[in-house]
Image: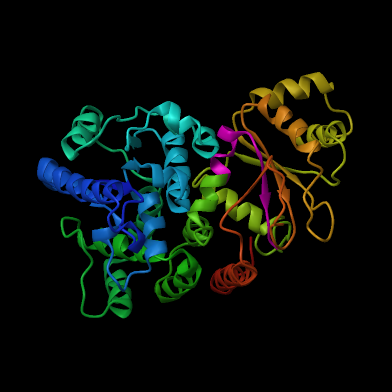
Amino acid sequence: MAALRIFISHSSRLRDSDAGNAQAENNWRLLRETCAALAAHYGEAIEILVDYEGLKPSDRWEQCLDEWLYDCHAAIILLSKRAIGESNWVRKEATILSWRAANERGFMLFPVLLDGQTPADLDRDDYFRMLGVSREQCVQEAACAQAILDGIEPRLVARISQEGSSTPFERLVAAVETVLAKEVKESTLSDLWNKHFPGTQPSLTHLDPTKRFARGLAGHLFSEGEKSLERFRNILDGLVPRPGRLSAEEMLRYIRALWVDVGAAGVIAGAKSHGKCLALNGQCVVKGGTLLGTERFTLDRYLERAWPATDQIKVIQVSQLKGAAEIWQEVRQGYWPGEQGPPAGFIDAQLRKDDRHLIVLLPTPAQSGEAPDSLLLPALEDLARQCQSLTFVVHVGERIPVDLPSDLRPVLPELDEDTEWTQYGEELKARELINTKYGSTP
């Protein structure tokens, strides 16, 4: 059985200003001792993902951390006072991890409260209260590594013994691997592997050769999200004989949203838990593309990244930013289009119990990208709270305004213009390659 990957989120690394700070030195020592104790106790049953020993100087550390957050099976958050009060990285990691804990069966999150803190202290911080981290089973009064092990062991042992539970990353890689292994001969996969990685062999030697090369190439597609579309083109162009068109389309569907930052995806996926409207910037948020089969390129890819491998997403686009009543009437019309729909009360009842991911996209209030009226936002939040799965997203223009109202939460990191247009162009190239190989879209 493969090792259980455990991510450790912390803000314990010593800074120059921490010299002589006993609390900081104790937390740094506790982190290292906890990692050592986990490794000694569980051995090869686990793999510890922590930034101070799992990353090399040559690694792109931000990208590696994002991949770990998406690919771990469980996570420990060491919540020191500094981690809660000062670390934006811990907040980002807590956002993603709490989203996964809320939405993935089998994923386990272990908040560990340090420095004498309690769940009540955690809830006094607006951000962590919004995430609901204290609702998880917290480990308290953890003054040593053994106390942390004792606090997490009952649930962690049960998780290690589970069979068949996979991460979103594993499921996507497995889907692409299946397409390649089913459609392409071993010799073709081997030649393509040697072209990209001469003199090497893919890992996972227990698999048969076809699956081993397919798994290695699938992992290559997923290893750097911003390069996935370019790599997809190179791999598809090298598959001779080529797989069927439907298989090529399926692979593209799995990888086309990987350029979206996983932290931003976590903000969107976790929006329902904090109830706030979201602010999304970008030039291609509502840009359509017939060849790409989308009406809202950037928004659609962000939603695919937030909820991978599901079609249970519905976007309702509102034409004007008016009052809450007028906006809600447009929501009704977008949810149930047609001139002679059912009564408004019936549509509202359907909206309230709809378990799909419902996104209401609101337009930019002005060309300057100013935020909507702060009085409107609480009214929209009240409407969203009445529904099982509905979130309001405001397109705020090319950049996120610096003076956003407190009721409007930005989707961060902010989207860079060059990244947006580059990925739009890369997806166009991938689609054009498919049409060149297989003919125009059927």
Q: Is residue 133 above or below residue 430?
A: above
Report the front residue among 413 and 344.
413
Q: Is residue 356 left or right of residue 199?
A: right
Can see residue 3? no
Can see residue 120? yes
Report the front residue among 440 and 202.
202
| 139 in magenta | no
Q: Position of residue 389 (x, y in %)?
A: 62, 31
Q: Is residue 122 left or right of residue 374?
A: left
Report the front residue among 256 and 388.
388
Outermost residue to the front: 20
Q: Position of residue 124 (x, y in %)?
A: 50, 31
Residue appearing at x 87%, y 36% in the figure: 323
Instruction: Report which quarter residue 194 is drawn in.
Output: bottom left
Residue appearing at x 38%, y 33% in the figure: 105
| 281 in magenta | yes
Instruction: Report which quarter residue 118 is drawn in.
Output: top left
Q: Is residue 174 above or below residue 104?
A: below
Report the span colored magenta: 268-282
